[in-house]
Image (spheres, helix red, strand yellow):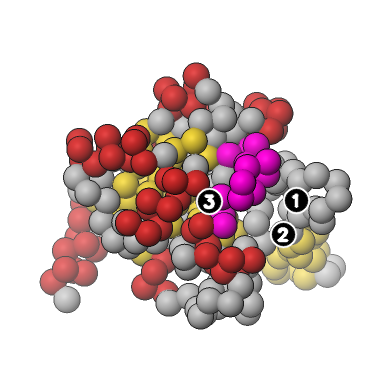
Amino acid sequence: MSVLSDLVAALESGSVRVVDLTAPLQPETPVIQLPPQFGASPGLTLDVISRYDEAGPAWYWNTLHLGEHTGTHFDAPIHWITGRDLPGNATDTIAPRLFVGPACVVDVTAESGRDPDYLLQPPRLLEWEREHGRIPARAWVFMRTGWARRVTPEAFFNGGHTPGIGLEGARFLAGERDVLGVGVETVGTDAGIAGGFSPPFPNHTTMHGAGKFGLTSLCNLDQLPAVGAVVVAAPLKIVGGSGSPVRAIALVGG
């Protein structure tokens, strides 16, 4: 119990900070855009049930309508065809201990600024490891691109040109490093043009086929060290859920 007591004391003293990695969820929150032949995920709509009025004189609450993959959200393995038959592949069956893990933050802001179609691949990951050490098993690997600073939908989607995890990068992280999953600041863990790759959407195909997870639309990655933070990202326990909006937080030592 001393570890947990020490953690509580560190949170109280401020020697451990809580960093919110979650973008605000509102009707204006951007949602991934797919070609018109595919089903579209809706943005958030919020309807008031009552707000201290005749429908409920002392209480306020709302009805939410949104897709599972809206805003800062969690991708479960069942989200992709490659992960559909895996055990423990949905938001209600994933072991809760897997929602907590260390974070490795790979800063490719400069590369993504020069090339919005930038793909994170093994050479950059190995370069990161030479500086910060081997990526541990069951870690989150976050791709910091600066995309969270893009506040308008036009800049955020950038005409479909956004960075992501490349095929060999996904294979390296899922297979050789056995990570929990990957997290990005963009709307999806694959590059915006990845629908035209072979295979299409290689990070989704690889990660979810290996039983790994994804986090998207993260923010405040610039407040995390390259190593040392611990991330908590627990989706709603939707039965058979393919994903869920999530309040992702990081614990960062002083």
Q: Is residue 203 above or below residue 86?
A: above
Q: Are marks 1 and 2 in contact (CB under 8 Å)?
A: yes
19 horizontally vs 72: left or right = left
Q: Nearer the viewer, residue 45 or 131?
A: 131
- Where residue 203 is drawn, which disc sits there? 3
Which residue is located at x 49 percent, y 27 percent?
Answer: 112
Q: Nearer the viewer, mark 3 or mark 1?
A: 3
In percent of width and height, residue 223 lies at 35, 37
In percent of width and height, residue 94 lies at 48, 75
Q: Are marks 3 and 1 in contact (CB under 8 Å)?
A: no
In percent of width and height, residue 42 lies at 78, 53
> What whole-number distance in Å separates the C-alpha atoms at marks 3 and 1?
24 Å
Circle 3 packing at 10 Å, graded few (<14), some (14-19), many (20+), is many
**Residue with the mark numbered 1:** 43
- Where residue 67 is drawn, which disc sits there? 2
> What whole-number distance in Å separates the C-alpha atoms at marks 1 and 2?
7 Å
Mark 3 secondary-structure assignment = helix
Q: What is the tally of numbered marks visible in this picture?
A: 3
Q: Which residues are magenta?
A: 191-205
Circle 2 packing at 10 Å, graded few (<14), some (14-19), many (20+), is some
Which residue is at the far top? 114
Q: What's the residue type where badge 1 is placed?
A: Gly
Q: Is residue 115 above or below residue 40?
A: above
* Residue 218, magenta (yes or no): no
Q: Nearer the viewer, residue 118 or 1?
A: 118
Which residue is at the far left? 2
Circle 1 packing at 10 Å, graded few (<14), some (14-19), many (20+), is many
Q: Which is more N-terminal, label 2 or label 1?
A: 1
Q: Nearer the viewer, residue 22 or 6?
A: 22
Which residue is located at x 22 percent, y 49 percent?
Answer: 134
